[in-house]
Amino acid sequence: MLTTLQIVLYAVICGFLGYLLADKLGLIRPFRLAKKESCITLLAGAIAGIILSADAFTFAKWIPALEGNYDTAKEFDAATWIASVLYGGIIEETLLRLFFMSLLAFIGWKLFCRKEEQVPTKVLVISNIIAGIAFAAAHLPSTAMLMELTPMLVFRCFLLNGSFGIVFGRLYRKYGIQYAMLAHMLTHIVSRTIWLIIL
C-alpha cells in the first residue's frame, strides 16, 4: 500500500511533468482566483457536494454494504476531513487533471492534429472525458478493499466520480488547475458537512 510520502512524491513528479505539458497546451493560467471564475467554481463545487451527499440517501439505501460506511460520517474528525479535502483537491487533481488529462491531450494533438498550431478543443474535450472515466476507475480498488464490487456499485462509482471528474476537468481547461482543485475541495467540504448535520 502506498505511503503518504510515496503519494506526495508521485504527485510532485507528475505535477512537474503535468505543468510542462499544460504549458505546451496553453492550459497554464496565472495562479490567482478571479471573481467571475471563482463564483462559477464555487457554485459547481457546491452543487457537486450536494449531489455527492445524496449518495447516503440513494445508493446507500440500495447497497447494504455501502450504508455502513456512512456511520463514520456522523461524527466530525478533523484529520479525516483534512485528508479528504487535501487528497481530493490537490493530489487527485494533480495526477488526473494536470498530468493525465494534459498527457492525453498532448498525445492526441501530436498524433491526430499535428498540423494544428494549437491543440484543438475537441482533443481537450475527449481527453477530459477519458480522464474523468479514469478518475472513476481509480476509485474501484479502494472500494473493493471495503466491500464486494457489484454492478450497482460500479455503476455508482462511474456515475458520480466520472461526472465530477469531467466537471473538474472542464474547470481546469477553461480557467486553470487551481479552479479544479478548489471545486474538488469544496465538493468534499459540502458533502461531509451535510452528512454531519443530517445523518
Image: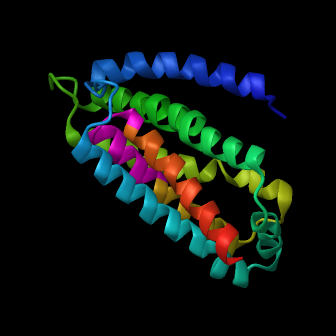
- The percent position of residue 37, horizontal first and vertical second, equals 26, 45
* Residue 147 versus residue 134 in the image, above or below: below
Tell me the residue at 45%/30% (across/down). Answer: 98
Q: Is residue 196 above or below residue 96?
A: below
Where are the magenta residues, as a range?
165-178
- Point out the image quarter for the C terminus: bottom right
- Report the residue at 28% width, 26% height from top: 29
Is residue 172 or residue 141 the one in the foreground?
172
- Report x, y in % for residue 67: 78, 75
Name the residue at 31% across, 45% down. Answer: 38
Residue 48 horizontal side relative to residue 91, left or right: left
Picture coordinates of residue 7 (x, y %)?
A: 70, 27
Q: Where residue 26 sits: x, y (%)?
A: 25, 24
- For the stretch drawn in magenta, the main secondary structure is helix
| In-image side of 16 versus 152 (left or right) | left
Q: Quadrant of residue 153?
A: bottom right
